[in-house]
Image (cartoon, rainbow, N blue to C red):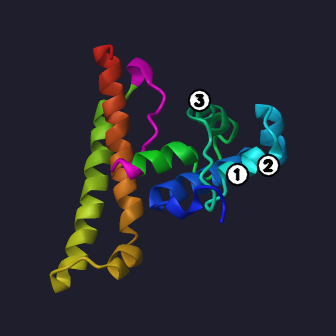
């Protein structure tokens, strides 16, 4: 058994898997090892869920930047946030003074109404189950609702100078 592998818990495994995903998205082990000036075997160990070897924290942003824009990005940051009970939503670029507040509120209302309607549809049998969530596309709708709310929050912070 690999060093420390007997003590790996779900959080350790999630970090290793997220690291492997980030490395793959950043250009795979050979490229990442060269860019980080580390051996390929070291980079491979970071993504091995059977070994207690983890990417140094200071290198996480470097690898995440190398994989920017790829599916699941930011892989490691997202896994760490999820372990702490958070979900990540990217803040949009500020729209400046030209943001159409009324349009944003209209979109927020529409998205809120969409997810509300789907939840009510699912509750025809007094519960929301996994089948309903998938069948009605509720996760996508909820993500869209949160995305609009996050855009409004970002703009409010910009206006407040935060």
Q: Is residue 86 magenta?
A: yes
Residue 24 visible in rendering: no
Local packing at callout 2 (Cα closer than 10 Å; few below 14, some 14-19, many 20+) is: few
Residue 23 visible in rendering: yes
- Residue 13 in the image: x percent, y percent? 54, 59
Judged left or right of residue 24, residue 19 is: left
Residue closer to the observer: 6 or 63: 6
Q: Secondary structure at mark 2?
A: helix
- Residue 8 in the image: x percent, y percent? 51, 59
Q: Is residue 1 above or below residue 128?
A: above
In which image quadrant can residue 69 be found?
top right
For the point 35% across and 73% down, the residue is 133
For the point 50% across and 60% down, the residue is 7
Local packing at callout 1 (Cα closer than 10 Å; few below 14, some 14-19, many 20+) is: some
Q: Earlier in the sequence, mark 3 or mark 2?
A: 2
Q: Earlier in the sequence, mark 1 or mark 3?
A: 1
Q: Nearer the viewer, mark 1 or mark 3?
A: 1
For the point 62% across and 62% down, the residue is 50
Residue range in magenta is 83-98
Q: Is residue 48 above or below residue 55?
A: below
- Please name the residue that numbered disc 3 is placed on: 58
- Please name the residue that numbered disc 2 is placed on: 41
- Please name the residue that numbered disc 1 is placed on: 45
Local packing at callout 3 (Cα closer than 10 Å; few below 14, some 14-19, many 20+) is: few
* Residue at the far top in the pictured view: 161
Quarter of the N terminus within the rendering: bottom right
Give yes or no for contact between labels 2 and 1 (Cβ–Cβ under 8 Å): yes
For the point 74% across and 51% down, the residue is 44
């Amino acid at each position: 058994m690999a060093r420390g592998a007997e003590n790996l818990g779900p959080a350790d495994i999630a970090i290793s898997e997220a690291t492997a995903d980030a490395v793959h998205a950043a250009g795979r082990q050979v490229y990442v090892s060269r860019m980080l000036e580390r051996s390929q075997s070291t980079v491979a160990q970071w993504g091995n869920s059977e070994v207690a070897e983890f990417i140094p924290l200071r290198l996480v942003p470097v690898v995440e930047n190398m994989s920017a824009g790829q599916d699941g990005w930011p892989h490691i940051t997202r896994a760490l946030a999820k372990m702490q009970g958070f979900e990540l939503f990217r803040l949009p670029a500020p729209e400046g003074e030209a943001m159409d507040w009324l349009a944003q509120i209209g979109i927020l209302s529409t998205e809120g109404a969409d997810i509300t309607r789907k939840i009510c549809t699912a509750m025809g049998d007094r519960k929301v189950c996994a089948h309903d969530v998938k069948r009605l596309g509720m996760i996508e709708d909820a993500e869209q609702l949160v995305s609009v709310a996050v855009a409004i929050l970002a703009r409010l912070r910009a206006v407040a100078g935060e």
